[in-house]
Image (tube, helix red, strand yellow):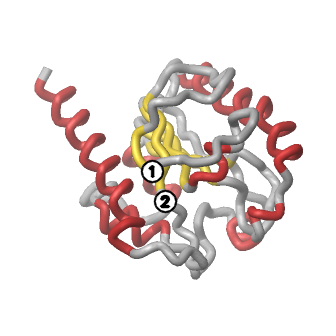
Amino acid sequence: MGLAEKYGDLPLRLLLVGHNPSQHSWDSGHYFSQPSNNFWKLVTESGLLGPDVEANDDSMVEKMQIGFTDVIRAPHSQSSSISRVYFQEQRAFFYKRINDNAYRVGAPPERIAFVGKRQFSMLFDPPLKSVDLGLQLLEPPGFPFNTEIWVLSTPSGRSPMKWEERLQPYTELAQTMQSAFFTSNIE
């Protein structure tokens, strides 16, 4: 079956970028479908979902203009085993895919959020040694457009991170998006 990137037909308010799809997501055709993955709980608790939006990738694309992709488009459940060299080889292809979509819909995403630190870090050469969660001040070299870049905590059930720490960047992103939506509707 495979996991198609989910961009929709309108400019995105947010593009969520995973490392690579798990085999479970690849087989199901839905992002973050692995039962041990906490992504859907994080976006629900953070307030990132609108009140009439179901916690699934199709509903978020259709109703909220939130898209989904991965830096690497090959399924693998152990993202840490993907080499730095392979990641560097895939960087240009990732940039091309998101840039092609921005061209197709007429605008880049307002925000891009990397769901985990590693995929953001690996866009740099050499990779960043340390990445803080939240809104980023650094832009990866060659990044195809100027947009807000966020790094969210990993939703993996394997991570030992405390729930409050894990939830915080999602909540900050949700508040920023709600504030931007409110401001644009007033003008």
Residue 54 visible in image: no
* Residue 135 in view, yes or no: yes
Task: Judge whether 87 appears above or below 115 on screen.
Answer: above
Q: Position of residue 65 (x, y in %)?
A: 43, 41
Position of the N terminus, as image quadrant, is bottom right
Q: Residue at x 62, y 43 (%)?
A: 120
- Residue 124 placed where, x, y %? 69, 34
Residue at the disc numbered 2: 153
Q: Residue furthest front?
A: 129
Label 2: state its secondary structure: loop
- The amino acid type found where label 1 is placed reads Leu
Please name whichever residue, 182 or 141, is drawn nearer the observer in this view of the structure: 141
Q: x and y percent of residue 109 in the render?
A: 48, 30
CB atoms at circles 2 and 1 under 8 Å apart? yes
Kindly identify which residue carries mark 1.
133
Q: Is residue 78 left or right of residue 119?
A: right
Residue 170 vertical placement versus 16 (above, below): below
Residue 57 lies, in percent from the top left, at: 52, 57
Residue drawn 85% across the image and 53% down it:
83
Calculate the distance from the C-alpha at mark 2 to the C-alpha at mark 1. Answer: 7 Å
- 149 is higher (above) or lower (below) than 17: above
Disc 1 crowd rating (10 Å Cα; few below 14, some 14-19, many 20+) is many
